[in-house]
Image (spheres, rainbow, N blue to C red):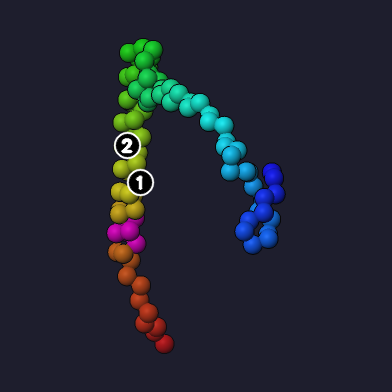
Amino acid sequence: MKGLPDGQGKIRLGKAPEEKAPVKAAKPPPKPKAGYTDLYKYSTEWEKFVFWLGVFFSLAGGCVLPTYGIVIGKMVESFKPTLETTE
């Protein structure tokens, strides 16, 4: 970096006006990565079947959990607490 006087007697640090940064060559765009379906390109029919079977049962298991919440919530609501005390 060179010190160049500006018009007010101060020194301005930086590149001289005639010095320009070298132009970098543009990089080629990156190659596209493998998509999700490309991961199963070489799988057998049995592996695809087991995959979709797992997807089905995971969805079924995910639907059961909220159902448990509804059923247990109704069971808890059926027990009405009484705050009356007998003396």
User: SS class of the residue under badge 1?
Assistant: helix
Q: Which residue is mark 1?
A: 65
13 with respect to 47 (left or right): right
Magenta stretch, residue numbers: 72-76
Around disc 1, counting alpha carbons within 10 Å, would you say few (fewer than 14), some (14 to 19), or many (20 or more)?
Answer: few
At label 2, the amino acid type is Leu
Q: Which residue is mark 2?
A: 59
28 with respect to 56 (left or right): right
Please name the predominant secondary structure of the magenta segment in the image: helix
**Residue toward you, 81 or 24:** 24
Q: CA distance from mark 2 to mark 1?
A: 10 Å
At label 1, the amino acid type is Leu
Q: Is residue 13 above or below residue 36?
A: below
Of all residues, the one furthest to the bottom in this rendering is: 87
Image x and y of residue 31, in percent = 43, 22
User: SS class of the residue under badge 2?
Assistant: helix
Whether residue 50 is visible to the viewer of this picture, yes or no, is: no
